[in-house]
């Protein structure tokens, strides 16, 4: 039997910034399908900027972003999404006056109708709470439900690599755990997940590997277990 090769996102030597202010200084990382990778770092280290540059919302100054060996440079965010790169931005950006289902369908605008209904069923199986609330306006959902909807909407486009920015922001510890555990399930379905998360302890619980970013570059990388037991990581991010 021929096995389908694992697809990989590869970022090398990425530099980017805003105006004259440089934020990324040669950042590199890799995420393969079926693994959950955490991007850790202090406020302002450049994690959100890295995700925005990879997803095509921000143009890099230099460096490469490849999906399965194909360069994505110059491709719009929409084209990158069609090639399998999903992005759940910080702040969720839902349409609050539209229903849960309408928001989900927007994430699959480029799929044929039969594909959309299959995808809806998949998302409702992953997030039963969204299934119960499919007709409810997005703006009236709880914070945790809104985060699930934002993740569900990105999954509607059938990404093979999904980047998620600060999913636990503003959530109670219990809900944060619930949202991150759904990302583990997404990973088990074979999607590669790149997770930016302030809650380092929680993200290292669900991640396979991680990168620590300081001043726009990776200063440490390793398995989640190695990072959780690293003295520097413990002091800086785990308050141990
Ligand atoms: N649109 C923008 N215009 C100008 N500067 C920006 C913009 N967005 C971010 N920055 C700056 O870029 C730097 C990196 O920000 P970024 O949001 O990437 O960091 P981060 O690691 O995600 O931090 P946080 O966890 O606080 O979101 C910060 O100094 C920030 O002020």
Image (spheres, helix red, strand yellow):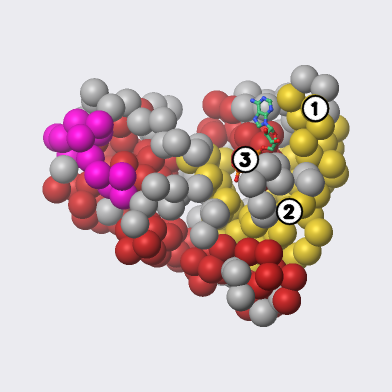
* Percent position of residue 215, x then y: 79, 46
Q: Secondary structure at mark 3?
A: helix
Residue 30 to residue 27: above or below = below
Q: Is mark 1 within 8 Å of ligand 1?
A: yes
Q: Say whether residue 185 is visible.
A: no
Q: Nearer the viewer, mark 3 or mark 1?
A: 1
Residue 40 to residue 81: above or below = below
Q: Residues within 10 Å of mark 2 (few under 14, many from 20)?
A: many
Q: Is mark 3 within 8 Å of ligand 1?
A: yes
* Percent position of residue 201, x then y: 54, 68
Q: Secondary structure at mark 2?
A: strand
Residue under label 2: 213
Residue under label 1: 21
| Point 51% across, 56% down: residue | 191
Spatial CA distance of label 3 from label 1 is 15 Å
Would you say residue 64 sits in the magenta stretch? no
Find out whether the residues at labels 2 and 1 contact each other: C-beta distance under 8 Å. Answer: no
Residue under label 3: 48
Answer with left or right where residue 61 lies relative to residue 89: right
| Point 41% across, 30% down: residue | 93
| Point 68% across, 64% down: residue | 236
Residue 210 to residue 20: above or below = below
State which image quarter holds ligand 1. top right
The boundaries of the magenta stretch are: 134-145
Q: Nearer the viewer, residue 103 or 225?
A: 225
* Percent position of residue 186, x then y: 43, 58
Residue 233: quadrant of the picture? bottom right
């Amino acid at each position: 039997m021929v096995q389908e090769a694992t697809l990989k996102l590869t970022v090398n030597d990425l530099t980017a910034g805003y105006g004259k202010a440089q934020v990324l200084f040669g950042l590199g990382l890799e995420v393969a399908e079926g693994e959950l990778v955490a991007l850790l770092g202090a406020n302002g280290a450049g994690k959100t900027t890295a995700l925005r540059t990879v997803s095509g919302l921000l143009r890099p100054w230099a460096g490469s972003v490849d999906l399965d060996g194909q360069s994505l440079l110059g491709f719009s965010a929409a084209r990158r999404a069609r090639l399998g790169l999903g992005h759940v931005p910080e702040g969720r950006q839902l349409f609050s006056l539209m229903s849960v289902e309408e928001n989900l369908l927007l994430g699959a605008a480029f799929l044929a109708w039969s594909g959309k209904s299959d995808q809806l069923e998949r998302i409702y199986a992953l997030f039963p709470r969204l299934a119960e609330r499919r007709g409810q306006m997005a703006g009236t959902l709880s914070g945790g439900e809104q985060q699930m909807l934002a993740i569900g909407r990105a999954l509607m486009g059938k990404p093979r690599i999904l980047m998620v920015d600060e999913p636990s922001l503003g959530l109670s510890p219990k809900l944060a755990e619930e949202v991150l555990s759904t990302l583990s399930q997404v990973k088990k379905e074979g999607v590669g997940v790149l997770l930016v998360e302030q809650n380092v302890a929680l993200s290292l619980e669900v991640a396979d590997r991680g990168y620590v970013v300081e001043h726009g570059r990776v200063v440490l990388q390793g398995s989640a277990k190695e990072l959780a037991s690293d003295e520097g990581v413990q002091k800086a991010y785990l308050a141990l």
